[in-house]
């Protein structure tokens, strides 16, 4: 696959090794030797006859309770579009995802290769979310200033941020060599945190300073959470990201006979080891049921009966409680976003049909990405999936058409015309679920692209 990196000393290694426990030391040693050194490492992509160089960044991570220096690779500024579609440093054209639904400046790549985002809710505790009326006023201004009249989001919500983290960490992409790494939470945690180092929020804070990842079987996770809790203190909100294990309503009876109060309670997978309790106002359960009906429905089922997993991003203020020698962390959620994913690959899916396509593609050992919706409304034209192992170096778009009402068919016609004009007749794939609910057309064939030599296993 396209994740081989060539180092200045001539060695070749795969970026995926950073998620394989036995390979991590060798991979980190290669990065350490290349940090702040020219020439730089490069991937397989070439532009105008030259290799596309990559930059090595340094950050601190925690292993076995101790802080250690760690390194990761990032692309050079403004080169996302130059990397080939099957390269992990490729950035899909924002016009091909819901990112196109943002107003100018909401997501901005800076000259040093970071990405700066304008969040709807600041992370300082004194910041309150901008009220819907101010957002609406901005939208109206934006609409008045633009001829095409399409409303654009002037701020990013928690859902948009979750999609950005998934996209920048490459977790919305799949190729067969990834194997089972996505079910190993510490690997997922490290990739998402690396992406968060490069995302700047507010007045210049890296998102990674506020983000704690909660997951099952992560020996270092609880210590990392405690560090973040300390950094955020009373003045900053914390962002908690993990697989959601349960969501429901609880009633708490105040000791001393006070009135009972209802709360929404969310539990992350593995939260027990973190002594972490997430609650929110009781209205959140119905809000989430309306906004993310498929996630909430899945979470009401027994674990073994869920077809999808749900990833949650919670923005919260934190309180630490010490009772009878035990320390527990109580998070009071200000906002919650949920995202449905395929349980083994963590690829986001927006319907049961998309889940079937994802699983069929994996079964056929295909490579693909899932363009994400961010905060866009329904009228953005972006494909449901993009195959990245076909003849077309731009990737081959895939559409799952799930409905046949009039408005939907009108949008389908726009999309069909766009794909025919851009990619050519029969040069993209679609499945019309209404006319053929149980069978989808064969996927466009894969081509094998040459890979440099290396230590395959
Ligand atoms: Zn590349």
Image (cartoon, grey):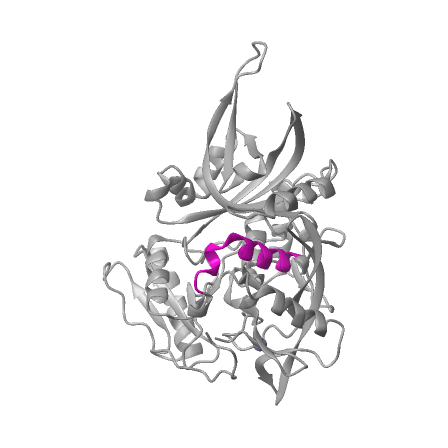
Residue range in magenta is 179-196
- Name the quarter showing ligand 1: bottom right
The answer to whether residue 401 of the structure is visible from this angle is yes
Q: Is residue 351 left or right of residue 282?
A: left
Residue 118 percent across, percent down from the top left: 67, 53
Q: Is residue 411 left or right of residue 262?
A: left
Q: Main secondary structure of the magenta part?
A: helix
Query: Would residue 191 be counted in the magenta stretch?
Result: yes
Residue at x-position 37% and y-position 74%:
428
Based on the displayed image, in which of its 4 quarters is residue 73 positioned? bottom right
Q: Residue furthest bottom?
A: 49
Out of 384 and 67, give the one closest to the viewer: 67
- Say which of 33 and 269 sits in front: 33
Q: Quadrant of residue 83?
A: bottom right
Question: Does residue 200 appear left or right of residue 136 in this picture?
Answer: right
- Residue 124 in sight from this viewpoint: no
Name the side, left or right, on which 177 lies relative to 355: right
The residue shown at (61%, 61%) is 146
Q: Nearer the viewer, residue 173 or 188?
A: 188
Locate residue 170, reporting x and y percent: 54, 63
Whether the magenta-drawn stretch holds residue 210 is answered as no
Q: Position of residue 301 (x, y in %)?
A: 35, 38
């Amino acid at each position: 696959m396209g994740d081989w990196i060539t180092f200045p000393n001539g060695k070749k290694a795969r970026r995926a090794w950073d998620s394989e426990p036995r390979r991590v030391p060798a991979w980190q040693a290669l990065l350490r030797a290349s940090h702040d050194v020219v020439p730089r490492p490069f991937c397989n992509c070439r532009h105008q006859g030259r290799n596309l160089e990559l930059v090595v960044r340094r950050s601190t991570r925690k292993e076995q309770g101790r802080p250690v220096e760690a390194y990761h690779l990032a692309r050079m500024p403004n080169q996302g579009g130059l990397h080939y579609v099957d390269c992990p440093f490729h950035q899909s054209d924002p016009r091909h995802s819901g990112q196109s639904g943002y107003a100018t400046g909401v997501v901005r790549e800076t000259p040093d290769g970071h990405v700066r985002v304008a969040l709807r809710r600041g992370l300082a505790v004194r910041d309150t979310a901008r009220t819907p009326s101010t957002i609406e006023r901005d939208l109206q201004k934006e609409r008045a200033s633009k001829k095409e009249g399409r409303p654009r989001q002037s701020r990013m919500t928690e859902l948009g941020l979750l999609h950005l983290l998934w996209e920048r960490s490459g977790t919305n992409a799949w190729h067969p060599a990834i194997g089972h790494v996505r079910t190993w939470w510490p690997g997922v945690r490290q990739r998402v945190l690396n992406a968060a180092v490069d995302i700047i929020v507010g007045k210049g804070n890296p998102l990674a300073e506020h983000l704690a990842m909660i997951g099952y079987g992560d020996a270092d996770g609880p210590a990392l959470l405690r560090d973040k809790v300390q950094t955020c203190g009373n003045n900053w909100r914390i962002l908690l990201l993990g697989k959601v294990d349960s969501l429901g309503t609880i009633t708490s009876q105040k000791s001393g006979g006070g009135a009972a109060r209802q709360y929404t309670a969310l539990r992350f997978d593995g939260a027990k080891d973190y002594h972490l309790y997430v609650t929110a106002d009781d209205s959140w359960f119905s809000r989430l049921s309306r906004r993310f009906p498929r996630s909430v429905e899945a979470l009401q089922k027994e674990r073994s009966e869920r077809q999808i997993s749900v990833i949650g991003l919670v923005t919260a203020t934190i309180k630490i409680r010490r009772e009878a020698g035990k320390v527990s962390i109580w998070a009071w959620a200000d906002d919650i976003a949920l995202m449905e994913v395929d349980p083994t690959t963590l690829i986001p899916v927006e319907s049961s049909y998309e889940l079937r396509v994802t699983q069929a593609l994996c079964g056929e050992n295909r490579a693909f990405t899932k363009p994400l919706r961010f905060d866009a409304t329904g009228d953005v034209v972006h494909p449901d999936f993009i195959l990245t192992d076909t003849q077309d170096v731009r990737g081959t778009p895939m559409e799952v058409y799930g409905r046949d009402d009039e408005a939907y068919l009108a949008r389908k016609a726009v999309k069909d015309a766009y794909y025919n004009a851009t990619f050519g007749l029969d040069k993209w794939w679609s499945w019309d679920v209404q006319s053929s609910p149980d069978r989808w057309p064969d996927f466009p064939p894969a081509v094998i692209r040459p890979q440099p030599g290396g230590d395959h296993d």
